[in-house]
Image (cartoon, rainbow, N blue to C red):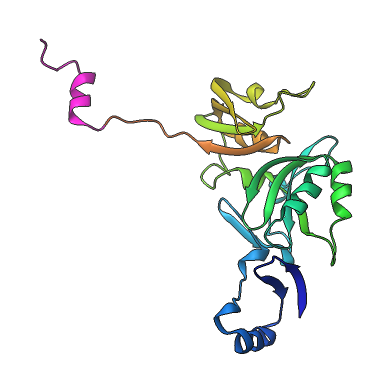
């Protein structure tokens, strides 16, 4: 049995099925089998990092290039303050937590090389991989095409503090509103269906969400729209 980490109130260990049976016999209910720690769970996608990435179509894979890009970093167990400090010390911009024991970060190749030194049998990092455009687009928009206008929300990394911090997203549609919160800049915009895949390929894009058109279904609302309400 390999001791992965002592968390004080419990040990996290790697064990075979036979070893799990032995541990259960020795410790009873205190020995809990936990299989989810190796899984990364994204919207519509879940995969075990010990088995590698899931299949991603070539046209939806993250492209290599200069500058920062979004990466997924998974730790070997529940993340400790020391491990978080190691992640910050690489210079990477931490965007959000991702189940399980993982973070979405924005970093360049040099920062990623620093993290690779912590990746290995004795290091705290279990896996580093791409945050592909495939993960950013919901299934109902993934293969959208044509010139039909679709209203969407697009979240990008907030780069307002950078000298070259302007996202390319607004150039691909008509922006109606935008706001910044929690390290993200969110655009609500009208885009052509064919532009969605192009938006997802932008390095700073976090997610794309379709905005459903509001419909008034209440009878009183229908009367208001038809100007048939009783006047004073």
In the picture provided, is 27 more to the left or to the right than 87?
left
Q: How far across and how far down the image is residue 146, in percent?
A: 56, 33
Quarter holding the C terminus is top left
> Height in image: 23 above or below 228?
below
Q: How far across and how far down the image is residue 51, in percent?
A: 72, 67
Q: How far across and how far down the image is residue 2, in percent?
A: 78, 76
The residue under the point 85% across, 56% down is 118
- Residue found at the very far front of the displayed protein: 8
Q: How far across and how far down the image is residue 5, in percent?
A: 74, 67
Q: Is residue 157 visible?
A: yes
The residue under the point 60% across, 39% down is 207
Is 221 one of the magenta-colored residues? yes
Q: Nearer the viewer, residue 7 or 35?
A: 7
Query: In which image quadrant can residue 223 be found?
Result: top left
In the picture provided, is 33 more to the left or to the right than 52?
left
Q: Is residue 197 visible?
A: no
Quarter holding the N terminus is bottom right
Number of numbered discs present? 0
> Height in image: 117 above or below 191?
below
The residue under the point 73% across, 66% down is 50
- Residue found at the very far top of the displayed protein: 232
Is 141 one of the magenta-colored residues? no
In the picture provided, is 114 more to the left or to the right than 106?
right
Query: In which image quadrant can residue 41 be found?
Result: bottom right
Instruction: Specify start and end residues of the magenta stretch as a single range.
Output: 217-232
Q: Nearer the viewer, residue 143 or 99?
A: 99
């Amino acid at each position: 049995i390999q001791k992965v980490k002592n968390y004080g109130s419990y040990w996290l260990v790697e064990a075979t099925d036979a070893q799990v049976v032995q541990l259960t016999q020795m410790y009873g209910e205190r020995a809990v089998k936990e299989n989810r720690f190796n899984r990364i769970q994204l919207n519509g996608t879940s995969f075990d990092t010990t088995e590698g990435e899931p299949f991603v179509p070539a046209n939806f894979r993250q492209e290599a290039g200069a500058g920062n890009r979004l990466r997924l970093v998974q730790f070997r167990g529940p993340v400790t303050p020391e491990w978080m400090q190691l992640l910050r010390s690489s210079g990477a911009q931490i965007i959000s937590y991702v189940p399980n024991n993982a973070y979405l970060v924005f970093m360049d190749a040099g920062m990623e090389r620093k993290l690779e030194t912590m990746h290995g049998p004795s290091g705290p990092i279990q896996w580093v991989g791409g945050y592909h455009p495939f993960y950013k687009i919901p299934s109902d928009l993934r293969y959208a095409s044509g010139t039909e206008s679709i209203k969407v929300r697009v979240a990008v990394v907030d780069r307002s503090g950078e000298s070259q911090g302007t996202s390319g997203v607004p150039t691909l549609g008509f922006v109606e509103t935008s706001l910044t919160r929690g390290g993200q800049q969110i655009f609500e915009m009208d885009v052509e269906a064919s532009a969605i895949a192009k938006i997802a390929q932008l390095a700073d894009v976090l997610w794309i969400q379709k905005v459903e058109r509001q419909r008034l279904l209440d009878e009183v609302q229908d009367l208001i729209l038809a100007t048939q309400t009783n006047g004073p």
